[in-house]
Image (spheres, rainbow, N blue to C red):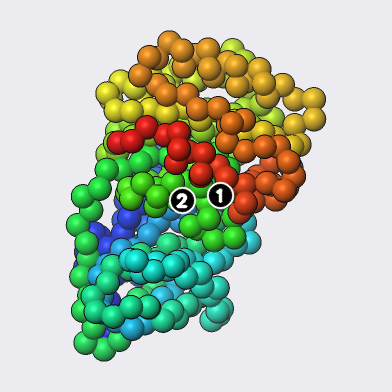
Amino acid sequence: MHIDLTADVGLYRGVSQCLPEPDGVLELSRMSARLKELYSANDPVKIRASCATGVRMVFETDSAWLRLSWRALRSARDVHACDVEVEGCPVLTALPEAIGDNCRIQVELPGRGVRRVTVYLPHLRELRVLSLELADRAVFRTVTETRPRLLLLGDSILQGMTTTSPVKAYATAVARSFNRDYLNLAVGGAVMNGEVAEAAAELPWDMVLVAFGVNDCNQEVGLEAEARQTEKTLRALASTGRPVVLFTPLPWPGRGGKNLDDYIACQKRVAANFPRVTVLDGYDAVSIDQENFIDTCHPNDLGNRRIAEFLIRALPRF
């Protein structure tokens, strides 16, 4: 049984827009039109902003299996795994088979009767979902989202580079633990940017986690600019009256002589002017030990798990 992927956009989570293309396939964009423009400086930025980070398909079915195919476009990292979660069962990680330019997974769904299924699309590549198939005469229905929404603003670390599958990224792990909806607007290479925050403030959300800083330091944007953009960011988000959490940069094994500590101190000084902003220190979340990192900057699966465990303890409930 083939599911009409355009009939009900309530099938999708973690998106700001579902944009029909000439061939009838939807672009599942986590970025609003304004954010897409802000993240259009060059192809690497466009690719990272167009990745399906945090994008999910949520539905109820009694099917014993599903088959999902997508058109593989550009990628930020060579990670293609897709996670499938049946409510109450362990997450299944599926590696797609290549069929020309397309990818396909087939997954046996555990349990019996009508169950809620969440499909976490590959988080570090741009794609277009082409088809979803279930067993003949299976129940299929979308699910109305009623949970509070966590908004995530940050760089490649918050985007999940480079975890081996979507649910291992700490942003997703935190949202799953809290049983919250979420929209991940993180973009690899991004720095603190007040215009991005102003655009994000226009979207529906209930709490926001802001996590920038390593790129700011590495690109040497300067402490004056860091203070200015942090102030603009926190002001835009805090003005909504909703909870704002500033998560300062994580330890950076490859920092060399770069003054990351000065950028962390700068962010904290600015945040002190916003009494309703909660500040969490990245250095409390994970150690700088190489066992937590896949390279000189990005946490691996273990590092992401430890960061998630810290945030699950430390984040305010909403």
Residue 172: x and y, percent?
45, 51
Q: Are marks 1 and 2 in contact (CB under 8 Å)?
A: yes
Q: Please tell me whether residue 41 is drawn above or below residue 135 in the rendered image.
A: above
Q: Image point 27% across, 23% down: which residue?
A: 241
Amino acid type at circle 1 is Arg
Say whether residue 195 is visible.
no
Question: Which mark, residue 78?
Answer: none
Residue found at the far front of this picture: 313
Residue found at the far bottom of this picture: 136
Say whether residue 112 is visible.
yes
Q: In which quarter of the image is the N terminus?
A: bottom left
Q: Please tell me whether residue 115 is drawn above or below residue 216 in the rendered image.
A: below
Q: Image point 36% across, 82% down: which residue?
A: 65
Question: Badge 2, how many Cα within 10 Å: few under 14, some, many 20+?
Answer: many
The Cα atoms of the two marked residues, 1 and 2, are separated by 8 Å
Q: Image point 59% across, 60% down: which residue?
A: 164
Amino acid type at circle 2 is Ala
Residue 195: x and y, percent?
43, 27
Pointer 1 residue: 305
Q: Image point 37% across, 32% down: which residue?
A: 316
Residue 119: x and y, percent?
39, 66
Residue 8: x and y, percent?
21, 64
Which sits in the foreground, 47 or 258? Answer: 258
Indicate the secondary structure of the residue bearing disc 2. Answer: helix
Pointer 2 residue: 173
Give the mark nearest the N terminus, 1 or 2: 2
